[in-house]
Image (spheres, rainbow, N blue to C red):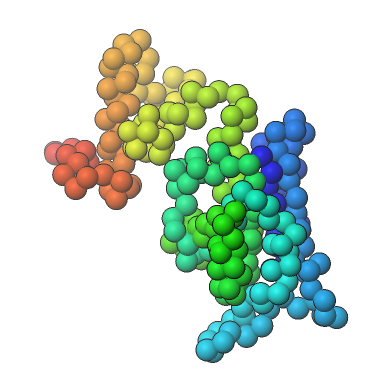
Amino acid sequence: MRLDYVTIFPDFFAPLSLSLAGRAVESGLLEVGVHDLRAFTHDRHRTVDDTPYGGGAGMVMRPEPWGEALDAVLRPGSVLVVPTPAGTPFTQATARELATREHLVFACGRYEGIDQRVLDHAASRDDVEVREVSLGDYVLNGGEVAALAVTEAVVRLVPGFVGNAASLEEESHEAASGGLLEHPVYTKPATWRGLDVPAVLRSGDHGAIAGWRLEQARARTARRRPDLLAPGQVEEWVVAPATP
Ligand code: 6GU
């Protein structure tokens, strides 16, 4: 898999040479390119933004440098990933889809966003797919941190990237967990600062352990993420407070 990032802050992507992705680059599983958008400007001040047509606050990224940068970086079959709070929600399903692709290009915008014609033009190519994605209902200053988060979610799903394939399947948001949040986990010691590991986990009764974990996952999901459940399940699975 090859990953390219177009940004006015190339230094944001230094972490890619550390950690998980760093090892994948060394092993040849991943190729990474980081491209300074300003290298595709031609004026003395290397201008990348201007005031918005129609008025309003903030600045919009001009289309010309983006057009030249994407002409240089996109290939037949690329997915252009555009992190934006106005995108469709990025989910584990999105990550699984992107993990099957050979080439992802991240267009990291700053200010109020990128001139829409840049994305419309890329989408008009029949050999490129454009995905505007949002990480959630909050606003970041730019796409760089979001691109790193998307990268980590995707790259760890690429076969050969994570040692233990079973650990991938049992996580929160994966089908094997029934679309529930993961149950709480414990390790040694059995008692720490007066807090005991739940006895069932030390019972050796694998059926009881599986039942307890499912109940915990359901209760946690009902409380924290009722949006993931069918309406009736929320009432059923939220554990009622103990009555005195
Ligand atoms: Cl993907 N980008 C930006 N700039 N802000 C965000 C976001 C993405 N997701 C949530 N907020």
Please say if 60 is above or below 21.
Answer: below
| Position in image of residue 38 (x %, y %) | 78, 69
Write down the quadrant of residue 12 in the picture.
bottom right
Residue 236 relative to residue 76: left or right: left
Q: Residue furthest left?
A: 244
Which residue is situated farthest in the bottom direction here? Answer: 55
Report the side of 112 relative to 231 (left or right): right
Residue 225's x, y, as percent? Answer: 32, 47
Q: Nearer the viewer, residue 220 or 38?
A: 38
Report the residue at 44% width, 43% height from top.
93
Q: Quadrant of the C terminus?
A: top left
Quadrant assignment, res 118? bottom right
Spot occupied by residue 100 in the image (x, y as percentages of width and height): 55, 38
Residue at 56% in and 87% down: 53
Extreme residue in the front direction:
126
Q: Which residue is pictured at 26% across the width and 44% down the height?
A: 229
> Which of the two residues, 117 or 189, is positioned nearer the viewer here?
117
Query: In this orientation, which residue lies closer to the viewer: 128 or 234?
Result: 128
In the displayed image of the protein, which residue is found farthest to the top?
A: 204
- The image position of residue 179, as x and y in percent, is 34, 38
Q: Quadrant of the N terminus?
A: top right
What residue is drawn where x is 74% and y is 37%?
25
Residue 19 seen in the current view: no
Asked if residue 196 is positioned above or below residue 130 in the image, the reply reads above
- The reply to whether residue 206 is visible in this rendering is yes
In the image: residue 167, left or right of residue 147: left
